[in-house]
Amino acid sequence: MQDTVVIIGAGQAGAQVAQSLRQGGFEGPIRLIGDETTPPYQRPPLSKKYLLGEIGSEALLLRPPAFYTTQNIDLIPGASVSSIDPGAQRLSLENGDTIGYDKLV
Ligand SMILES: Cc1cc2nc3c(=O)[nH]c(=O)nc-3n(C[C@H](O)[C@H](O)[C@H](O)COP(=O)(O)OP(=O)(O)OC[C@H]3O[C@@H](n4cnc5c(N)ncnc54)[C@H](O)[C@@H]3O)c2cc1C
């Protein structure tokens, strides 16, 4: 059984950690938790084409949503981490759910 890696923050750094783990051959569970409702996107979204409405917000995504499925990365959007219990290796979300981890990023 491989370690479960949990990444807090589904921004550019979090998405890259998840991708690099897969590229490096890690096959265990990866959970990418972000408090925004969208998959990781280019930040800030100041593309002139976007601001002019010439492209949609989906063009700003760092990777297409299908990437997380095909890479078996459990993207958990709209979830805010409120506390971490390192002793128990668990974190709590603002909605009351708890998630266990072996490695936390
Ligand atoms: C005005 C401006 C212009 C920039 N221009 C450029 C540029 O041209 N080129 C460039 O390379 N960089 C640019 N940057 C910098 C770039 O935006 C950042 O370096 C990059 O976004 C950092 O990524 P990150 O994943 O480390 O952090 P963030 O982008 O801050 O991502 C962190 C994520 O974690 C989430 N989060 C935080 N706390 C929690 C929690 N408790 N629970 C769950 N989720 C949480 C946040 O909502 C966010 O989605 C610019 C930044 C600014 C402000």
Image: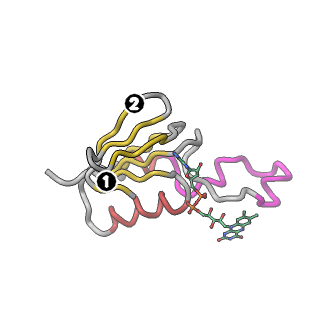
Q: Secondary structure at mark 1?
A: strand
The residue at 34%/39% (across/down) is 99
Q: Residue furthest left?
A: 1
In the rendered structure, does residue 40 fall within the stretch colored magenta?
Answer: no
Q: Ligand 1, what quadrant?
A: bottom right
Three-letter amino acid code at the position of disc 2? Asp
Three-letter amino acid code at the position of disc 1? Val
Q: Nearer the viewer, residue 56 or 85?
A: 85
Q: Secondary structure at mark 2?
A: loop
Q: Residue furthest bottom?
A: 24
Q: Position of residue 91 (x, y in %)?
A: 37, 42
Residue 39, relative to residue 37: is it above or below? below
Q: Nearer the viewer, residue 8 or 61?
A: 8
The residue at 32%/43% (across/down) is 90
- Cβ of mark 1 under 8 Å from ligand 1: the answer is no
Q: Position of residue 95 (x, y in %)?
A: 48, 28
Residue 5: mark = 1
Residue 97: mark = 2
Q: What residue span does the magenta drawing correspond to?
A: 46-65
Q: CA distance from mark 2 to mark 1?
A: 17 Å
Q: Nearer the viewer, residue 103 or 32?
A: 103
Residue 101: mark = none
The residue at 43%/49% (across/down) is 32
The residue at 55%/42% (across/down) is 35
Which is more N-terminal, label 1 or label 2? 1
Q: Nearer the viewer, residue 64 or 89?
A: 89
The mark closer to the camera, 2 or 1, is: 2
Residue 102, relative to residue 22: is it above or below? above
Residue 81 falls left or right of residue 3: right
Q: Residue furthest top?
A: 96
In the rendered structure, does residue 62 fall within the stretch colored magenta?
Answer: yes
